[in-house]
Amino acid sequence: MPSSGETGVRPLDPRLLDHARAARAYLVLCIGLGLAVAALLVAQATLLAGMITAAFLGGAGLAALRTPLLLLGAVVAGRAVLDWAQEVAAHRAGAAVISQLRAKLLEHVVRLGPGWLSAERSGELGALATRGLDALDGYFSRYLPQLVLAVLVPVAVLLRVFGVDLAAGLTIAVTLPLIPVFMVLVGLASRHRAHRQWQALSVLAGHFLDVVAGLPTLKVFGRARAQAETIRTVTDDHARATMGTLRVAFLSALVLELASTLSVALVAVGIGLRLLAGTVDLDTALVVLILAPEAYRPLRQVGVHHHACVEGLAAAGRVVEVLETPVPAAGARVAVPDLRVRPVRVEGVTVRYPGAAGPALAGASLELRPGETVALVGPSGCGKSTLAALLVGFVTPTRGRVTVGGVDLSGFDPEGWRRRLAYLPQHPRLFAGTIAGNVRLADPAATDAAVRRALADAGADFVDRLPDGIDTPLGERGAGLSAGQRQRVALARALLPDAGLLVLDEPTSALDVASEQTVVGRLGAVLAGRTVLLVTHRPAMLALAHRVVRLGPAAVPV
Ligand SMILES: Nc1ncnc2c1ncn2[C@@H]1O[C@H](COP(=O)(O)OP(=O)(O)OP(=O)(O)O)[C@@H](O)[C@H]1O
Ligand SMILES: [Mg+2]
């Protein structure tokens, strides 16, 4: 994980409210409900104290106490209704915020693009978007309402107690801050633990994804068992981190409990002595005694719930970090010049991947004239795929620039630019779905006939021989097809839209000579009139090119 995420564990992160609108409305509702709860609490204590005093000292019978009893019943019922409303609102808000954040996260990751994604760990991102965000539910359903109560209830109690007895009010006012102070101390101690717990989980998720995806390879090299061992180590690490967090949680509950019990005892002893001395009356003493524990309870509960949701908060902090990663500046959003008459130029471009020792491309230049097919060749690792990704805008130049008709590529709206071109990456990805669905990704409105034509252009004649034809379902990553068949379906996807610029990165690398010849034969007509960059190692493909450009090995690190 490249960034710390440690800033995530804050009780009420304003950035979280910024990014999830549902959270703001919910907070306002919580405050409203909290005010009502505080008012009912005070009313309940006052009614109880009044009734007990009237019954014991005034000798009032049941008939005389009817009105206060009914009122008390109404107060209790009111609190139950508030509890219910709180619960319902909490779960709704939790679900809404989580789905809002999840959607925003995915949207932002898409905008950040594959360049950013390749530097991140997709496993961590997966864990973040699923389990990480789900852990926020506890935050919204329990922690946040409790936090609001912890602010409102003590204030209401203090106001009421100060109204009847100054000394008791002062005692509560002095001892009350002890609880938040302890909480902050415990919080500081557990902060890095929660972070470590989340980090351990991310490592686990990333590692697990890697191992599952690479299981066949691991099995072949007899490393599957060893990897299981590694997973066990990582899992143990996570378990230890979780236990660490829990230990702090239990200890802190004990400390907070002790502090509040002692404080209540202090208030009780003080008021009891004065009651005996006759300086306060029973009614006042009862109001104070009933209310005093209520002042400490919500604060204590905040401490308890805090630990239940630190994981969610840590994840939310990380989500906010991702959301605040700036999307590469898009410039002035100028219109894309007409590719049929304007050349695409790579002008002295150097690309350096973050963390890489040397540049992947060093001062590369290339011109693609309109309607021209240029083959790009060169030794493996010399930067051909990097140059292709550069044209698509997935990679940004460290130095130099890419222009279309003299206009810098960075000035275009990335989406607008990508609509004008078609790109076949070196390792294209097919998704679970039908063959037609996979081809249609490039143009959702394409008819079946257009899909069939694209498949034929790509030399994917085998599709016609499948019993379900273009409606043949594929598994994840195109499972069910051979590597060469997958490559041709992916090529068909790139050929489907009538794009002005075609960037094809090794379109036939997985094909046998005969199939490749078929593809070369078909592509001749398809590529005519379009501007094409054809990255290839295969001599047969060179027949399609008007010009062959050789890319030298990347310059030695400077
Ligand atoms: N995401 C990345 N992060 C860091 N370095 C990278 C990354 N992708 C590629 N490189 C490095 O950049 C250089 C150029 O890679 P590139 O994939 O462009 O080569 P290529 O010419 O397409 O090779 P091949 O013919 O094997 O496909 C290589 O040295 C590679 O190690
Ligand atoms: Mg390559």
Image (cartoon, rainbow, N blue to C red):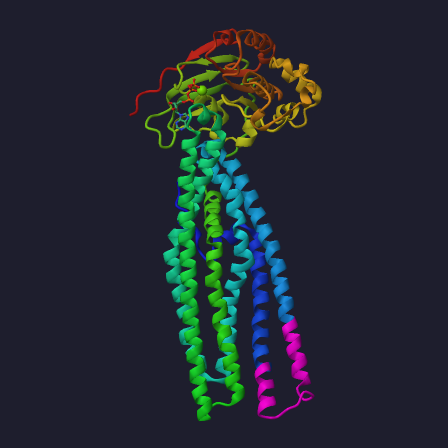
- Residue in the foreground of this view, choosing between 14 and 204: 204
| Quadrant assignment, res 42 | bottom right
Magenta region: 48-77
In this view, 400 is above or below 35: above
Q: How many marks?
A: 0
For residue 228, which quarter of the picture? top left
Q: Residue furthest left?
A: 558
Res 331 seen here:
no
State the residue in front, 512 or 154. Answer: 512
User: Is residue 82 found left or right of 251 in the rendered image?
Assistant: right
Residue 62 counted in the magenta span: yes
Q: Position of residue 181 (x, y in %)?
A: 39, 66
Percent x, y for residue 127? 50, 42
Q: Which image quarter holds the C terminus?
A: top left
Quarter holding the N terminus?
top left
Please tell me whether residue 406 is drawn above or below residue 139 in the rendered image.
Answer: above
Give whichever of 548, 133 is nearer the camera: 133
Q: Residue at x 57, y 52 (%)?
A: 21
Is residue 61 part of the magenta span, yes or no? Answer: yes
Q: Position of residue 265 (x, y in %)?
A: 43, 78
Rendering quadrant holding ligand 2 = top left
Image location of residue 438, percent across then percent down: 62, 25
> Residue drawn 43% across and 42% down?
235
Q: Closest to the observer: 341 or 383?
A: 383
Q: Is residue 227 visible?
A: yes
Q: Is residue 473 above or below residue 510?
A: below
Main secondary-structure element of the magenta-colored stretch = helix
Q: For the point 33% across and 26% down, which residue is it?
A: 358
